[in-house]
Image (cartoon, coloured by chain):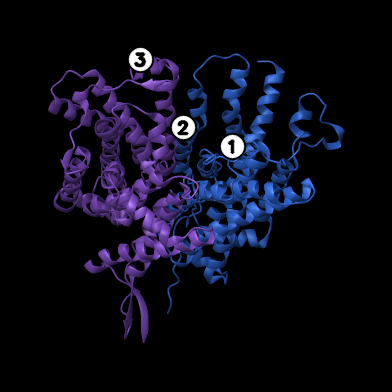
Chain colours: A blue, B purple
Amino acid sequence: MNVDVVVSVAVSAIAYGTPLVLAGLGELLAERSGVLNLGVEGMMLIGAVTAFFASQVLPGPGWAVLIAAIVAAAAAGAALALIHAFLSITVRVNQIVSGLALTIFAGTIGLSSYAGQVWGVGGQHGLHQLVKLDVLGLSGVPIVGPILFNQDAFVYASWGLVALVTYYLYHTRFGLYLRAVGESPRSADAMGINVSRYRYVHTIVGGAFAGLGGAYFTLAIAPIWTDGLTAGAGWIAIALVIFAFWRPGLLVVGAYLFGALSSLGFTLQANGVQLPSELFSSLPYVMTVVVLAVASTTMAQRRIGTPAALGVPYVREEG
Amino acid sequence: MISIERSLVTPRWQRIALPIASLFIASIIAGIVLAVSGHDPIGTYQQIYDASFTSAGALTATFVYATPLLFTGLAVALAFRMRVWNIGGEGQLYMGAVGASGVGLLLGGWPQPLLILMMMLGGGLAGLLWAMIPGLLRAYLRTNEILVSLMLNYVAGLFMYYLIYDSTSFWRDTTSASALVFPQGKDLLPAADWPGIAVGSFTMPFGFIAGGVFAVALLALIRFTRFGFEMRVMGDSSAAANYAGIRTRRTIVTVMALSGAMAGLGGASQIGDFGHVLDPRGLQQAGYGYTGIVVAALAMYNPLAVVIVSILIGALTNAGFALQGPTFPIGLVGTMEGIILFSVLGGEFLGRYRIRFGRAPEPAPSVDDEAGAEVAR
């Protein structure tokens, strides 16, 4: 393989990996607080259709429309996450079923499809797309130029968010409290931390991140809306959180690795490799299974990272 | 003193009242969604009712959708009741369809009863084997079965596409004139068509009757056998199951196997009852595996209730596809299913607690906490 192929794989790894970074980061925050949200796929789809619709109908200069569309997508994702937060934190239902309900509600033949049809954005071509920036005029530099200095603002923002979340988790008081809530809500409660409030906030922020991840599909990857266009990215994001051992840094590595896998088929076919396309398309899914299995063996030995109270509703025992 | 406490057993009347109340509440919420998006709720419900029950051929069409949902609903009900989270019903159904159509094509000349039996075996076995991947990984490596079973849905879907669109496999028709224009699967011989039972203009699919028999068998297995008892103990508390010396690994694998076999039988019924050909696109569009989750939850994971609920959700799905168009977006079906699920979940909560007057007794042991902890593996 020559250098050009490697660069093009890296570039598309970032393109396809960016939604995974964002949605995975959101799920990581929710799970750190002890809430498992299996509704990521649904929240991403709602984010994708909302962003696309907003970018089609809002007036104004391109950059303003795009910002508004991104905000709308985050709000839509957050609104859906609120349903899951209410059911799993306040009503204390089974989080697995509630999350699945969210994905069915918003998913491929759910609200996202309904919204797409009511808004009539199905056959439209996107008017506004995120453009690749030429950072510091370095995009022409061989190899690192196209990878590091020729991305759109969203990609740079996602890097910023990863740094921000890492700092928040490990270097702020709130981050410490958040980890306490996820590990031992009873002790956190005894310390005077409002367990429910922490869980609500991080589940909802997690939903907003998933909405952003969805927005990247319609605002950057392809300027169209079709039902179910995320094709399981939300589920891969959940898996990524597990094998990143709930750490933001590892999550980015995993997301770009899967981004590379998702685009490997196109790249190899463009370079004349003749293999069934289904083989390439199934790679991200097969790899998820393999990596999950490997991660679970080491994790069983070391119990690394899993928030101890993940999926467990917190009931305060009164007097 | 008034206190809200957990009731350990759900009274029998609540098990019937809660799903009905949930459906009622869901229809009100969905009505609001319809009204907000510019549709007439009453008119839409009337349309759904007509399209699923009263208009010509509607009831037969409803059972076309109810039959696969009965199988996938049973698959989910069994697994979820035991807290084995198999959401791979979709892929297991695909593999069942692949297996049953393969058997049907291979043994086309066999006498019909034997051929039907072999197709059911082929479909059930294919679904079972596909479910063994998440089942064994979960039992022996404690790998999260939710994600593994779900990922395999996509793999199974792509595998079907490969068989029909991207290879010259045994399943693909490579000779007929229309197959040269557009890739399609081989048609099965008439002997491989499962005979439905016609009552006037209504046809009851063979698969639905078979599914009903399986529902009774599963209920009997859960209620009256030693193994069923072990499964229930594991479903309520895996720690208790360990203390009691129940081999949880074997139990998990068996639950997964039975669940996968049910979904696989649903795939076999798709071939034998309805399609008579392996049609990847049609199977994937229908999404029966995922809808099985809605069916099972609304049936409160009771196999017999699944039979009735599958007809209800089958009716909704049928209406969705029949009315699909500008006035009735297909997305409405999933939206309504989601709202139904949310309502059922909220209702379950109400059923779990009761208001008590007087002194509060000892707090009841919580089963949910431990069940939740299992998620966090």
Q: Nearer the viewer, mark 3 or mark 2?
A: 3
Secondary element at tag 3: loop
Residue at 15%, 20% in the rendered image = B110
Secondary element at tag 1: helix
On screen, residue A315 versus residue A1, left or right, reads left
Q: Residues within 10 Å of mark 1 (few under 14, many from 20)?
A: many
Q: Is residue B352 above or below residue A254?
A: below
Subunit of mark 3?
B
Res B255 quadrant in image: top left
Residue holding disc 2: A290
Q: Which mark is residue B176?
A: 3
Residue at 35%, 61% in the rendered image = B23
* Viewer can see residue B201: yes
Seen from the viewer's position, the closer of residues B262 and B245 is B262
Q: Are marks 1 and 3 in one subunit?
A: no
Residue holding disc 1: A254
* Viewer can see residue A184: no
